[in-house]
């Protein structure tokens, strides 16, 4: 017992030390420093829908939490030696009816609200891939996740994948501002998850499957790409950079990179041709 107590104390002290010394080391430094307790700054067209969902869920939870704690506090202060609590099993017809009614109202109001709004957003925005894919403005990128990095591929001027003019980058995604970005995502080893906190998007990269996701960024700048699925020892290092450029800068970068790729292209290097024909969505 003595040993157990000591271990617990050590564990608690270690936790405090990590918090105290870990923070100044900027272990979790973002590309653009985020401050305060809020979520990362939303710089996307539709991220506000996810922010709303997170916030309203927090409010509902807070209301229920306060109600339940208040209820318990009343019971605690009301009952002492002079006024003992009366125990029952809550199985009287009236008690069951009251419990069912309260649960039903909470379920319909809270879960109904969240469900309807979430499905509407998925339908009209986040999973609206057909419309995004047919938009001539859309930028298409193929991403292959692997332990522990992101390979990214742009089709280049010919619009064909796995050809000499493809632009292939490592952990380095360049995109134009104010244009829809449509990604097809897979993995060559374990499950990873492509996550851009500043756009509130996150999709699993699953071996043998191609998953789509899309978003649009409204501010030029640099943002983090993170892996949001524990994928092995160096999961925490699986970080990419998303650079959002003006239309002109993006075009200049794409043209130059495509030119460089064509020079370095080796048709016999089968490993480097991991791209796939763009999938119908
Ligand atoms: Cu990963």
Image (cartoon, helix red, strand yellow):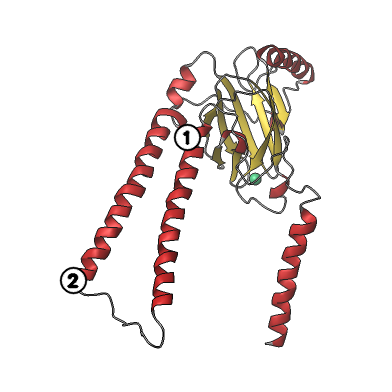
Q: Is 93 situated above or below 281?
A: below
Q: Nearer the viewer, residue 63 or 182?
A: 63
Question: Which numbered dot is residue 93?
Answer: 2
Image quadrant where one finds the C terminus = top left
At which x and y percent is residue 272? 71, 30
Outermost residue on the front side: it is: 82
Determine if residue 281 is in view.
no
Label 1 to label 2: alpha-carbon separation: 42 Å
For the point 46% across and 41% down, the residue is 53
At which x and y percent is residue 41? 62, 35
At which x and y percent is residue 4? 69, 82
For the point 44% across and 31% down, the residue is 127
Q: Is residue 126 left or right of residue 108?
A: right
Q: Is 259 situated above or below 221?
A: above
Residue 271: name its quadrant. top right
Q: Mark 2: few, some, or many residues within 10 Å (few <14, many ≥20)?
A: few
Residue 277: name its quadrant. top right
Q: Secondary structure at mark 2?
A: helix
* Ligand 1 positioned in quadrant: top right
For the point 72% across and 50% down, the residue is 234
Q: Secondary structure at mark 1?
A: helix
For the point 62% across and 28% down, the residue is 275
Q: Earlier in the sequence, mark 1 or mark 2?
A: 1
Judging by the rendered image, the residue that carries numbered circle 1 is: 49
Q: Mark 1: few, some, or many residues within 10 Å (few <14, many ≥20)?
A: some
Image quadrant where one finds the N terminus = bottom right
């Amino acid at each position: 017992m003595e040993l157990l107590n000591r271990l617990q104390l050590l564990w608690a002290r270690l936790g405090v030390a990590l918090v105290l010394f870990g923070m100044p080391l900027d272990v979790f430094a973002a590309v653009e420093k985020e401050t305060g307790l809020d979520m990362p700054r939303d710089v996307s067209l539709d991220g506000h829908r996810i922010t709303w969902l997170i916030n309203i869920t927090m409010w509902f939870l807070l209301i229920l939490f306060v109600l339940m704690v208040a209820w318990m506090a009343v019971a605690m202060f009301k009952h002492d030696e002079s006024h003992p609590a009366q125990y029952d099993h809550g199985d009287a017809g009236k008690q069951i009816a009251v419990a069912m009614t309260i649960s039903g109202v909470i379920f319909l109001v809270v879960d109904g609200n969240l469900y309807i709004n979430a499905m509407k957003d998925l339908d009209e925005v986040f999973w609206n891939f057909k419309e995004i894919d047919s938009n001539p403005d859309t930028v298409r990128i193929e991403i292959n996740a692997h332990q522990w990095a992101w390979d990214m591929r742009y089709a280049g001027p010919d619009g064909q994948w796995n050809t000499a003019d493809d632009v292939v980058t490592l952990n380095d995604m360049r995109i134009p501002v104010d244009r829809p970005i449509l990604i097809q995502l897979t993995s060559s080893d374990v499950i990873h998850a492509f996550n851009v906190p500043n756009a509130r998007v996150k999709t699993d990269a699953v071996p043998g499957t191609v998953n789509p996701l899309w978003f649009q960024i409204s501010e030029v700048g640099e943002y983090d790409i993170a892996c949001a699925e524990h994928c092995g020892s160096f999961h925490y290092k699986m970080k990419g950079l998303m650079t959002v450029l003006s239309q002109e800068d993006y075009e200049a970068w794409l043209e130059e990179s495509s030119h460089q790729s064509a020079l370095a292209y080796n048709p016999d290097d089968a490993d480097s041709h991991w791209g796939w024909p763009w999938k119908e969505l």
